[in-house]
Image (cartoon, rainbow, N blue to C red):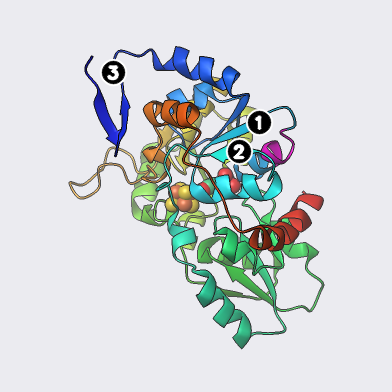
Amino acid sequence: MIARMLTGERTIDPTLDLFAEIDRLRRERKALILAHYYQDPDIQDIADHLGDSLELAKRARDAKDAEVILFCGVHFMAETAKIVNPSKIVIIPDLDAGCSLAEQCPADQLRAWKQRHPDHWVVMYINCSAAVKAESDIICTSSNAEKVIRSVPAGKPILFGPDKNLGAFLIKKTGRQMDLWPGACMVHETFSSQKIAALKARHPDAKFIAHPECEDHVLQLADFIGSTSKLLEFVQKDSGGKYIVGTETGILHTMKKHAPTKELIAVPFEDRTAACQGCNSCPHMKLNTLEKIYLALRDLRPRIEMPEAMRLRALVPLERMLAIS
Ligand code: 13P
Ligand code: SF4
């Protein structure tokens, strides 16, 4: 039998019907498969639940019958699942599926920032490690960020991180002054306002919709700004017929399914340089594959684990967020 090496000693028979095997294993393991909209289409299609960061955190918290949660997303999302539902075995297809935002904000540096601003509230975007969550007063996602900022007592100064673009968007929206951590999403920060303006000129009947992780010069061109699930909802409900979609390309799969009559154009469009073969694709999210999902279900690893003391501290700001979401 020919076997292909995947990760270290983990091998897989290339003749396996992965869809059938994943189905068998998910039943055997009593596993719930959660997937983010930025996953590859095949992964989105096998998920029990598909959603944005907030929806998936809620699905993980509410997973009662499952014994295993397989999180097809990135590390901070799987960590969040473990924090809110610690009795489950939480597995992720690839432990290296990180996030540029989480990487740019190490917990020791956040602690030093807090020490320089002891009277501030710390509001952290969910795209951060459990250690950073443990240092935070409240967490937000892109779909509830405005509500979370408005929940901070008036007059209380705010430290916001790690996404400076989401932070700047929230300052504009709420009028609240905040000190911003200098992090950014490596996917959304590559979008070019010049190319988008050219695209809009070529498609005057298209609306440009964008994720708030985009930089301000890009957001200024947007007809609608929202989280992945809000962008999806907008395309479904809006009366228009054509959209330039300013977020990671994975979401186009579900948008096409839910709004089959709408024309969708990814950003950037037809204009990739040799240095960038797919600027709108998250290299972390795309580390997950059906093969790795099969192996994770078969071996119940890699698992998400963390010290209980850290989990309990990280749970407090997450529960504050969930209580108002
Ligand atoms: P949402 O799922 O909240 O839209 O965030 C997008 C994202 O970049 C997740 O990493
Ligand atoms: Fe992180 Fe950006 Fe990838 Fe989302 S798209 S996981 S924010 S690097």
Could you classify mark 1 by the number of other residues whose Cα lies within 10 Å: few (under 14), some (14-19), or many (20 or more)?
some
Of 15 and 288, which appears nearest the observer?
15
User: Do the CB atoms of the residues marked 1 and 3 lie less than 8 Å apart?
Assistant: no
The CA span between labels 2 and 3 is 27 Å
Q: Residue furthest left?
A: 274
Left-right relation of 176 to 39: right
Mark 2 Cβ inside 8 Å of ligand 2: no
Which of marks 3 and 2 precedes in the sequence?
3
Say if 112 sits above or below 251 in the image: below
| Magenta span includes 56 | no
Disc 1 marks which residue? Answer: 67
Question: Could you say where residue 20 lies in the image, as x and y percent from the top left?
Answer: 46, 12
Secondary structure of residue under mark 1: loop
Secondary structure of residue under mark 3: loop
Disc 2 marks which residue? Answer: 89
Residue at image location 51% in from the left, 76% down from the top: 109
Say if 61 sits above or below 66 in the image: below
Question: Could you say where residue 187 lies in the image, as x and y percent from the top left?
Answer: 40, 51
| Magenta span includes 60 | yes
Instruction: Specify start and end residues of the magenta stretch as a single range.
Output: 58-63
Residue at image location 54% in from the left, 59% down from the top: 129
Question: Could you say where residue 102 lies in the image, as x and y percent from the top left?
Answer: 49, 59
Residue type indicated by callout 1? Glu
